Amino acid sequence: MKKSDFNYELPEALIAQAPLPERSASRLLVVPPGEAAFVDRQVRDLPEWLAPGDLLVFNDTRVIPARVFGNKGTGGRVEVLIERLLPDNAARVQIGASKSPKPGSRIALDAGGEAEVLGRDGEFYLLRFHVAGALESWLLKAGRLPLPPYIHRDPGADDDERYQTVFARELGAVAAPTAGLHFDDALLQALRERGVEFGHVTLHVGAGTFQPVRVDDVREHRMHSEWLNVGAALVEQVRATRARGGRVVAVGTTVVRALESASHEGELRPFAGETQIFIFPGYRIRSVDALLTNFHLPESTLLMLVSAFSGKERVFAAYEHAVRGKYRFFSYGDAMLLFPEASK
């Protein structure tokens, strides 16, 4: 299985550069299993596709203002993107600079204080921040929102609210769980009135989610590590949903990764810790019955995950339909509702 098997042509004009004024006004491509025709709707129509007793599972992670700027001792400019907060005001980061900083060197931060380079951690750097107070609190005041690299503009005031889900509460992500961005209070209320229940997991999306697959053989790819928490309350909700014949519907690929990471021999159990799970065709997803997700980058691990869930041929036919129909792609783009392959 080659990386190029997951490539597709996407006109750059279809990459959404900003959110729509209304979250739930995004388009929704419904992809039923088998040979059934695709259905073009809007996200606000989601309640029509769910039944009383179904369980929607959201990722309640909250995005950190994780981008900061500074200068090396030589005067060279540095951009720091935090990947993971660590104890003692340390962090795992990506660094953008003309020359790689050396261990022991320091970066004078534009917002005050400095960051000491401790060393490397694979493709990342380890920094210790010498700033006023706890790093997490300092970032909330001094950091900038890390919009994805395919959004070619600086973040504005609206992004501070729109690049968070309305149910975000657990601070720790550096990228939004984008399928959740489509939900607003009106849609959540309509789903409640439909009899749909809500559950939450936490998976702190890392900057590694934007890293390309660098090997030709997909099976040789090694995923970045992300922290997740699937609590006992959610596990009990899933069990109760299954018992009454309801469906578990994941809002986003991060929810799928969290639930699959917490599943052992088909049984979901409480779990908190790191995951490097890589889901691609050949892997059978057992934890969810439907998936709401955005459109993903060519050759990305997320496109491989949805191909594993609904079948590569079916998914790529849906993507062709979306390109022809001028759907909006990626983080601020439109969504699709997927079901498992008919043979599952």
Image (cartoon, rainbow, N blue to C red):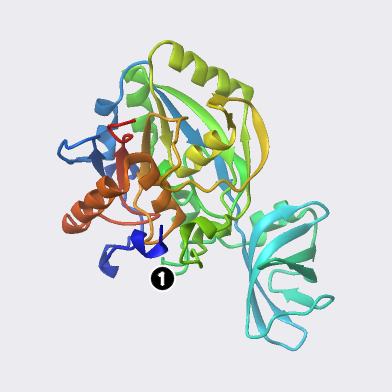
Label 1 sits on residue: 152
Q: Nearer the viewer, residue 78 or 83?
A: 83
Q: Where 175 falls versus 229 (above or below)?
A: below
**Which quadrant is the C terminus positioned in?**
top left
Q: Nearer the viewer, residue 180 or 290?
A: 290
Q: Where 125 falls versus 277 (above or below)?
A: below
Residue 155: % across, % down: 47, 64
Count residues near mark 1 (Cα–Cα under 10 Å), then give few for <14, some for 14-19, many for 20+: few
* Helix, strand or loop for disc 1: loop
Q: Residue at x 44, y 50 (%)?
A: 162
Q: Quadrant of residue 263?
A: top right
Q: Is residue 17 something one can see in this rendering?
A: no
**Which quadrant is the N terminus positioned in?**
bottom left
In this rendering, position of residue 27 left or right of residue 3: left
Q: Where 277 falls versus 71 (above or below)?
A: above
Q: Residue at x 39, y 33 (%)?
A: 185
Amino acid residing under circle 1 = His
Q: Is residue 251 something one can see in this rendering?
A: yes
Residue 296: % across, % down: 37, 55
